[in-house]
Image (cartoon, grey):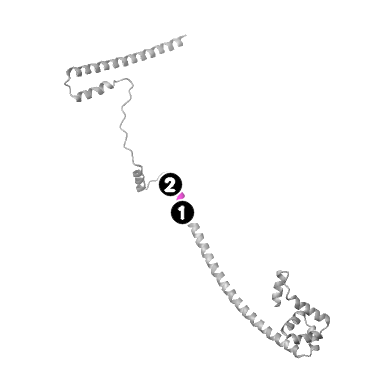
């Protein structure tokens, strides 16, 4: 029972204090209002007061003093130019954490680009050396091919001369003896002899050959004018000289 009574007493005291504060505030406001009214009436009645006095009296009447009023704020500091602040930090060697991270990443990127540039230069040097070696090999191969072509030309010329000598041998023989000896040779050799020998001389030799040998040689010579069926056959015919 005593506890509720104490709470009621505390509440009553708090309410009385609030009413007292409110009354003081109202009283102060009324006093200020009456002072402002009196000053206004004096200014209107006299009419000779300077304008500066009126300007000084009006702010006092317009700003009544009340309990709990906020303190006047100090003037804000002048804004700092960001570019000047950045220039000052750079001059002093001071960087923020974000700037340090950016600079670190740029350095890493620069190192990576330098490494790649070095690798490209190394590869370029290797490719240049390899290209020079290839050019040297190509020159050597061209020289070797020229030598082979020269030797092949000499060999072909020598073979042609030798075949002309062989043809003259068989042309000087009796037709029957020449036919017997030519028939014992392979068809390619027979064909070369027949193509180099005059038609009148070889005609007599062919008449002395057996019908089978004469037919085989004739068919082989006629096949030379036919187009080859495959590329391999064409290459073989070119290699054989027919």
Q: How far apart are marks 1 and 2 (CA)?
A: 15 Å
Q: Is residue 210 magenta?
A: no
Q: Which residue is drawn at 70% across and 72% down?
A: 234
Quadrant of res 229 = bottom right
The residue indicated by pointer 1 is 110
Judged left or right of residue 137, residue 14 is left
Q: Counting other residues with Cα less than 10 Å from the Cα at mark 2, is it few (<14), some (14-19), or many (20 or more)?
A: few
Q: Which of 76 and 97 is in front in this view?
A: 76
From this view, report whether residue 96 is shown above or below residue 237. above
Q: Which residue is drawn at 24% across and 22% down?
A: 58
Q: Residue furthest right?
A: 211
Q: Is residue 107 magenta?
A: yes
Magenta residues?
98-109
Q: Nearer the viewer, residue 49 or 75?
A: 49
Disc sitting over residue 100 in the figure = 2
Helix, strand or loop under label 1: helix
Q: Counting other residues with Cα less than 10 Å from the Cα at mark 1, is it few (<14), some (14-19), or many (20 or more)?
A: few
């Amino acid at each position: 029972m005593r506890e509720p009574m104490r709470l009621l007493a505390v509440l009553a005291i708090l309410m009385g204090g609030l009413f007292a504060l409110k009354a003081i505030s109202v009283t102060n406001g009324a006093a200020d209002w009456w002072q402002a009214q009196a000053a206004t009436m004096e200014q209107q009645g006299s009419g000779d007061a300077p304008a500066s006095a009126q300007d000084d009296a009006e702010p006092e009447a317009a700003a009544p003093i009340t309990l709990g009023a906020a303190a006047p704020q100090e003037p804000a500091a002048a804004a700092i130019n960001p570019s000047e602040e950045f220039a000052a930090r750079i001059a002093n060697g001071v960087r923020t954490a974000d700037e340090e991270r950016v600079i670190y990443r740029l350095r890493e990127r620069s190192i990576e680009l330098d490494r790649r540039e070095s690798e490209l230069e190394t590869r370029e040097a290797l490719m240049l050396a390899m290209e020079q070696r290839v050019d040297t090999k190509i020159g050597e191969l061209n020289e070797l091919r020229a030598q082979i072509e020269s030797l092949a030309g000499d060999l072909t010329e020598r073979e042609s001369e030798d075949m002309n000598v062989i043809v003259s041998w068989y042309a000087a023989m009796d037709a029957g003896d020449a036919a017997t000896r030519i028939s014992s040779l392979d068809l390619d050799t027979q064909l070369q002899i027949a193509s180099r020998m005059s038609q009148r001389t070889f005609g007599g030799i062919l008449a002395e050959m057996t019908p089978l040998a004469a037919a085989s040689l004739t068919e082989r010579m006629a096949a030379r004018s036919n187009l080859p069926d495959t590329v391999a056959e064409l290459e073989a015919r070119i290699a054989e000289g027919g």
